[in-house]
Image (tube, rainbow, N blue to C red):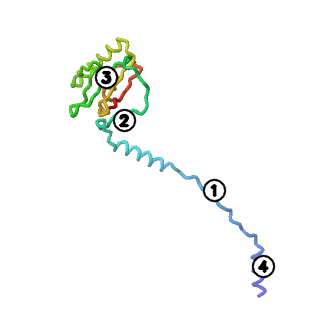
Amino acid sequence: MSQVVDDIEEEDEDPVRMSGGRKDEEEMDITPMIDITFLLLIFFVVASKMDPTQTGRIPKAVAGQSVSAKDSAVIFIAPGGASGAIVTDVSGKEFSKDEELQIAEIVEYVTDELDRGKQQVMILGDEDVNVLEVTKIQKIIGDAFEDLDKTYIAVKEE
């Protein structure tokens, strides 16, 4: 028995080994996560349908800046049903329904108004006008008059 006690005492005399505590965790490699994110982003951009002919209503004006119609070349847009919007000038003269002819008439009208001293263009749309129609007129003006400082879009509320 003395042999067993000596063995136990010898074991107790060995230095106690302490664990080194928690080792610092290695940094996580997020490269695969970034790759997946970009792949998903590319997938959704390619798979989504961008339809410029989507219809929408012009939002109601909440607050805005007052713009004088006296200083603006005013173009009126009213809903025209399935045939498209009715686009008129300030005197009530309707522009052509033919797209190319309408572009030429709008450019000529705005040019004449700017030559008379008007400083900007105001597109006045009825609240039921399709947003696409307003955007189409805005694009015509933007393409034809790149040096034009301001174009305003107004919503006629009833």
Whole-percent x and y of residue 85? 25, 29
Amino acid on which the number 3 mark rests in the picture: Ile
Discs 2/4, front:
2
Q: Position of residue 19 (x, y in %)?
A: 68, 65
Task: Give how far across and how far down residue 28 sits, in percent.
Answer: 55, 52
Asked whether disc 3 touches disc 1, contact meaning CB atoms under 8 Å apart, the reply is no
Q: Is residue 17 above or below residue 60?
A: below
Give residue 26's position: percent from left, percent from top. Answer: 59, 54
- The secondary structure type at the circle numbered 1 is loop
Residue type indicated by callout 4: Glu
Q: Circle 2 sits in a helix, a strand or a loop, which is it?
A: loop
Mark toward the viewer: 1 or 4: 1
- Residue 144's place in the image compared with 81, above or below, is above
Which quadrant holds the N terminus?
A: bottom right
Q: Out of 34 and 51, give the one closest to the viewer.
A: 51
Q: Secondary structure at mark 3?
A: strand
Q: Pointers 1 and 4 in contact (CB under 8 A)? A: no
Q: Residue furthest top?
A: 116
Q: Nearer the viewer, residue 141 or 90?
A: 90
Label 2, on which residue? 59
Residue at the spot 29% in from the left edge and 37% down from the top edge: 55
Q: Residue furthest front?
A: 158
Which residue lies at the image location 44% right of the left edge and 26% below the top edge? 65
- Contact (CB < 8 A) between labels 2 and 4? no
Give the residue number, with chain letter if any, for mark 3.
Answer: 75
Q: CA distance from mark 1 to mark 4?
A: 36 Å
Mark 1 or 4, nearer chain start: 4
Neighbour class for label 2 at 10 Å: few (<14), some, many (≥20)?
few
For label 4, the crowd category at 10 Å Cα-Cα, with few meaning under 14, some 14 to 19 and many 20 or more, is: few
